Image (cartoon, rainbow, N blue to C red):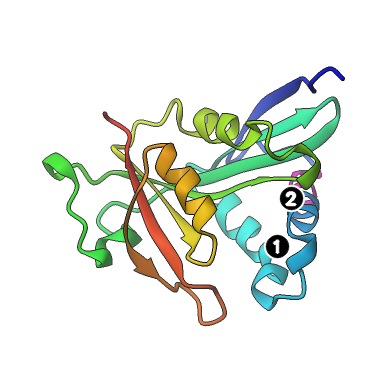
Amino acid sequence: MEPNVIELRHFQHGHLPEGFRQMLIDVHADAYADAMDDPFNQRFDWFVDHWSSAEGFTCVVAYDGHEPTGFAYGAPATPGREWWRDTGYEPRGGRTSTYSVSEVMVRPQWRKQGVSERLHEALLKERTEALAVLLVDVDHPKVQALYESWGYSKVGERQPFADSPLFAVMVKDLRD
């Protein structure tokens, strides 16, 4: 069987096509189908609206033909208000400009094919910030190990919402 050819498409704040929001919600529902009874996962549409309305929002979507297979998105953090600061982490050289990676997800049928890494790399490729930061559920050590293999380091833990899991705060220096 020949491997799927995955095409990556880039999107940004202010230039999102009609149906974009619903496509993200549908991919999420498929990616988290076994966990959609969790109230935190049921609020994903709020997160889509929050992040996609942020100035500087960027998103990369993977497609297999016309079928969206996954996506990665985020936005620059507000200077001086980077949420990782409460961990006590001190970046090298005092460089603190941060790109917050909010989501990297791939639908089950396309997992274990390198799609998530391609999405992540494409999302960060043109970033000018010094750091990338993301959260990983502490109950998913394999996911944390995957991000560590991509150059991230755990710098603390955080529970940003009362109904959210406890997350590992992971930071990557983009200027290495």
Residue linked to disc 1: 45
Q: Position of residue 105 (x, y in %)?
A: 65, 47
Residue at 64% x, 56% y is 48
Helix, strand or loop for disc 1: helix
The single residue placed furthest to the left in the displayed view is 93
Q: Are marks 1 and 2 in contact (CB under 8 Å)?
A: yes
Quadrant holding the C terminus: top left
Q: Nearer the viewer, residue 10 or 154?
A: 154
Q: Amino acid at mark 2?
A: Arg
Give above or below for 99 relative to 176: below
Give above or below for 112 relative to 53: above
Residue linked to disc 2: 21
Give the left or right position of residue 32, taking residue 86 as reference: right
Callout 2 crowding tier (Cα within 10 Å): few <14, some 14–19, many ≥20: some
Q: Nearer the viewer, residue 57 or 112?
A: 112
Mark 1 to mark 2 CA distance (whole Å): 8 Å
Q: Amino acid at mark 1?
A: Asp
Give the left or right position of residue 133, taking residue 33 as reference: left
Residue at 47% x, 72% y is 166
Give the mark nearest the N terminus, 1 or 2: 2
Q: Position of residue 98 (x, y in %)?
A: 33, 45
Q: Examine the residues drawn in magenta and state their main secondary structure.
A: helix
Return the mark for residue 152: none
Give above or below for 163 relative to 55: below
Q: Position of residue 156 (x, y in %)?
A: 31, 64
Quadrant holding the N terminus: top right
| Highlighted magenta segment, given as a residue range | 19-24
Does residue 77 belong to the magenta stretch?
A: no
Does residue 23 belong to the magenta stretch?
A: yes
